[in-house]
Image: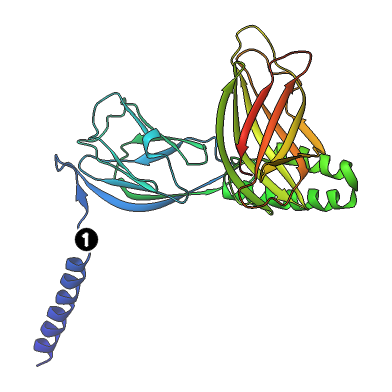
Amino acid sequence: MLARCARLAALAAGLVCFEADAARPPPYRSASGARPRKLQRRTLVLTDANLNDVQVIHVAGGVPTSLSFSQPIRPSSVILADTSDAFLPLRATETSLVLLPRRDLKPTALATLSVTLADGTLLPLVLATVRGEADLGVDIQLALVHKARPESPAALKASLAQLHAELDECRANTGAAGVASVARMVLEKDAPGPHAFARMDVRRRDKQERLLVELARSYRLFGHTYLVLTLENRDPSLAWVLDHPELTATGNGQSADVHVVSFEMDVPSIGPNETGRLVIAFPTPVLERGGEFRLRLLEKHGTRHVRLDGLSL
């Protein structure tokens, strides 16, 4: 009786072990069946300290490796450089891409992957086959602060905090000096993304006197409007220098000059085939329905003036 119980107990233990082995996923073997390989999912956290380090992605023949990014990427900018022609064409979306190698990479093979994030940050990666493991999925997370691109979320938060501090300082100023300070601040901080004040995109391009003038956007803050423009000098031999801008509000057959409190340029002179940026600050006028603006940019010591009519700001 005791012997029979012992045999039953041993059989039950064997069944438990068999079920556990059946539930456990079998190790992956390469196409040649040479040795088992552990499939894994990893997380790579990129910080200021390791951003310049080249991260390695472990790939294996026949194993699709999925890379997921915490920030959007530019799918058209993904570059796979493979000297051994071991990879099938990769598939990329705005948040992920999939690598599928036909075979293991030899130790002497060189394969790299360059991924550019939507904010312009470049991530270089090395692809290699390692003994005993392969990446089934890799989550790539960015935690950058000092080296973050100006458009990245971390940089925008830091920029926004600095912007609040600079606005507080501007409130302490009075009159034209305070407005000029804000104009300089807008010139330095102008970038796509969230802002602590009203911001409107203004799309208008015009070519006059070999100057390509583009109205980019306008800001409204403390009862003033700050108009941001880009000027490209397409003259191959002559520089262009702004003397001053003039602004007029029109409506119902009438026109009135708008006082330009301040204007700031990022360069004192726009050389041949160069580009400069301009911010014009003026009190925000109340226009009647259908009212528009007319802007003139007068060249210093020259006649290459620019006139833009019918502006809706």
Comparing 102 with 239, the one in front is 239
Side (left or right) of 106 relative to 195? left
Q: Position of residue 29 (x, y in %)?
A: 18, 47
Residue positioned 67% across, 39% down in the render: 293
Residue type at mark 1: give it. Answer: Pro
Q: Say how the picture is coloured.
A: rainbow
Q: Is residue 10 above or below residue 141?
A: below
Quadrant housing the N terminus:
bottom left
Side (left or right) of 49 relative to 4? right
Quadrant housing the C terminus:
top right
* Residue 278 falls in image quadrant: top right
Name the residue that disc number 1 marks: 25
Dot 1 alpha-carbon crowd within 10 angstroms: few under 14, some 14 to 19, many 20 or more: few
Comparing 202 with 255, the one in front is 255
Residue positioned 67% across, 14% down in the render: 271
Comparing 98 with 200, the one in front is 200
Residue that sits furthest to the top in the current view:
237
- What is the count of numbered marks? 1
Q: Is residue 47 above or below residue 126?
A: below
* Residue 311 falls in image quadrant: top right
Residue positioned 85% across, 52% down in the render: 171
Q: Position of residue 297 (x, y in %)?
A: 71, 26
Q: Position of residue 312 (x, y in %)?
A: 61, 43
* Residue 295 falls in image quadrant: top right
Comparing 245 with 89, the one in front is 245
Side (left or right) of 255 relative to 101? right
Q: Position of residue 54 (x, y in %)?
A: 47, 35
Element carrying mark 1: loop
